Amino acid sequence: MNEFTPQELVDADNRVRAMAAPPEQLKAALQQAEGYRNFLATLTGLLTVVFVLKGQENLSKMTTGPRWWVIGLLAGAFLLLLLASWLMVSAVHERPGRKLPSGAEYLLRYEKKRARTIRLMTSWARWMGLLGVLAVSAASLITWIWPGPVA
């Protein structure tokens, strides 16, 4: 005995076909990229607040080695988060002023290619965001562990 009726199976099959269509794949990829872009912006703001409130106020008081590690980690994190944000904006909005030529085949190819590109950009941005967060966290930990000479 099957747990689903024949009509439920037909309806599910139709939904799967609709979701696999290039326009739906593109729409899903854009929604996912938009969500990650918003998450990345929120995360970057929170990390900035945490580091400013909890990190060392004056890095010049730290010994040379840890100070340069903190500076390098923060600079690297900034670049990673900036690049990740740029990738997400590019994934969601594409190039300004781009015009699509007419034609059904071209449109279908464009939708497939664009959905793949968005997924790839989103994947790269997620990893860059993670590395940026880890770099900021490591820099903050270094300021707590090696705060510098005690006066």
Image (cartoon, grey):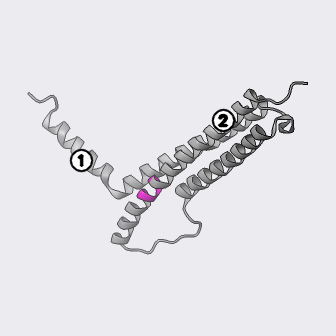
**Could you tell me which residue is drawn at 40 percent across and 66 percent down?**
110
Q: Position of residue 105 (x, y in %)?
A: 33, 70
List the single residue furthest toward the top.
151
Nearest the viewer among 83 and 38 is 83
Q: Name the residue under label 1.
A: 14
In front: mark 2 or mark 1?
2
Q: Position of residue 85 (x, y in %)?
A: 61, 51
Amino acid carrying mark 1 in the image: Asn
The chief SS type of the magenta part is helix
Residue depicted at x 44% and y 51%: 29
Residue closest to the eye, 27 or 54: 54
Which residue is at the far left? Answer: 1
Q: How crowded is mark 1: few (under 14 residues within 10 Å), some or many (20 or more)?
A: few
Identify which residue is drawn at 57% across, 47% down.
128
Vertical order, 94 against 104 (above or below): above
59 sits left or right of 107 in the view: right
